[in-house]
Amino acid sequence: MSNQDEIRVLQRIAAAVERLLPEPEPMPDIKSADAYVWDADRKTLIAVPEVQHVDMQLLHGIDQVRDILLANTLQFSKGLSANNALLWGARGMGKSSLVKAIHAHINKQSPHSLVLVEIHREDIHTLPQLIHMLRGWVIRRFILFCDDLSFDQNDSTYKSLKTVLEGGLEGRPDHILFYATSNRRHLMPRDMIENERSTAIHPGEAVEEKTSLSDRFGLWLGFHGCSQDTYLEMVDSYTARFKLGIAKEELHRQALEWSVTRGSRSGRVAWQFIQDLAGRLGKRVS
């Protein structure tokens, strides 16, 4: 077989392989929505026409962290300097709700000024690819959001996040921020930290790489369990907002009974109680 014949055979093989490959996903229209979900498998963004959120005025017991995160996000939306943020602490106290509420609040004041992009925990290793895709879209400002972020034993994907937070050689694009929520302050379980410390030759150095991940967030915002008074304040606020029409004494009695059955008091528990109450009263809340 001559060289020309070999070349023609190779060209036919290459053409056949190309036909078998799936069509690349089209680049989404970043102007079509204010929120997207990152599809890591197809390497594309899926538009979310309307983000379910709670009005910021209904989030009680987190006034200080709310004001800090709102100020940071407003700065970013105006093209000013801002920090990546880690919202950590008690379950059900409004961490993810606050991020979505602030996004909605700012876009209501300045339409289309912020884009919220959700990336799932299991896809965090593809974060650099997402940022690479968005790097050229400087006409919009993006908050990349990962809910319930944490890392377990032998999980090395945190290294990808660390590089992104630091910016690497290229630096973090000015039009992209990263917000995450977690139940863990250091994004890893305490027993994992203690195990690393107890078995290492240099205990301090052994855990520094993993615990320093949290240090790369400019903002650490702590969310803590609420008092009974704060819990009832949340219930009162929801009740007034949705005009449920129930006497306060009876409302509080039922709300406290509900919290006892759940074994906790939080914004999430208050909202679940309100949904149950509204249903029993023949009403619908959303």
Image (tube, helix red, strand yellow):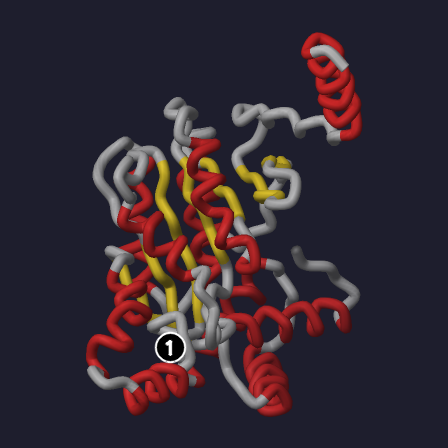
Is residue 37 shown to the viewer in this render?
Answer: yes
Name the one closer to the observer, 131 or 102: 131
The part of the image, by quadrant, that contains residue 2 is: top right
Give the total number of marks visible in the rendering. 1
Residue 250 in percent (x, y) is at 61, 83
- Residue at x 62%, y 40% (from the top left corner): 50
* Residue at the outermost front position: 1
Mark 1 neighbour class, 10 Å CA radius: few under 14, some 14 to 19, many 20 or more = some
Point 33% across, 56% down: residue: 162
Which quarter shows the N terminus?
A: top right
> Residue 49, image x and y in percent?
64, 36
Q: At x 50% / y 82%, what residue is drawn?
A: 265
Q: Secondary structure at mark 1?
A: loop
Circle 1 residue? 224
> In this view of the protein, can residue 93 be seen by the observer?
no
The percent position of residue 190, horizontal first and vertical second, equals 38, 84
